[in-house]
Amino acid sequence: EWLQFTEYLISSVFGIFIYLKSKNKNTINSFIWLILSAFCFFVAAEEISWGERITGFSLNSLTEISIQSETNLHNLPFFHDFFLDPILIAICILFGWIGWRKWPDFNSIPNKKLSLFFLITALYIFYYEISWASTVEHIRNDLEIYEFLLSTGIFLHFWNNFKLFIKGNPR
């Protein structure tokens, strides 16, 4: 989780840099960079329970109802049980397949070269959920590995675009 935190935090910084260096900030592409940067910051904060793991400070109202007894939103029972996995699958399919096919000119959406980071993650989460909904034996919950794969794909996307902006030739 610390690696994921680091990747998401650095990605958010890269994304803000890319947004600020964009020539036209009023485009959908620039807006997507801004949204993805905010999303990465939010996920980074969630990964370390909004600083609870560093400071030891927690919100008892959240930790009492959290699945992992931590101060974060993604482990609240209602969200975790009903929305987290479908949202992750949708994001992974958007980044791994739909995005680069439907909007190839948007550099804010990961390109085809990074698609397997997202599609493999979506496939695992889907298979995991199906194993719980069916009568077959349940598979192990190795979601942290696939969450790391997801964060690495996002980090590489931000890193590749950051390097292009540094060189002065964003695609």
Image: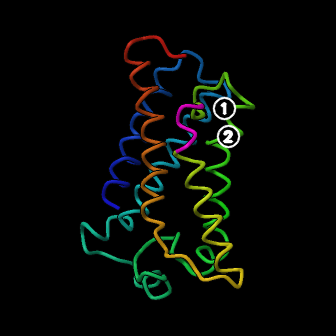
**Label of residue 13 in the image:** none
Q: How many marks?
A: 2
In this orientation, which residue lies closer to the viewer: 147 or 5?
A: 147
From the image, tell me which residue sits under label 1: 100
Image x and y of residue 145, in percent? 42, 61
In this orientation, which residue lies closer to the viewer: 107 or 112?
A: 112
Image x and y of residue 164, in percent? 43, 18
Using the rendered view, name the quadrant where residue 54 is placed.
Answer: bottom left
Which residue sits furthest right? 102
Say left or right for 33 vs 3.
Answer: right
Q: Quick check: is 127 in the magenta stretch?
A: no
Marks 2/1: CA–CA distance: 6 Å
From the image, tell me which residue sits under label 2: 97
Using the rendered view, name the quadrant where residue 46 is placed.
Answer: bottom left
Which amino acid is tagged 2?
Trp
Using the rendered view, name the quadrant where residue 104 is placed.
Answer: top right
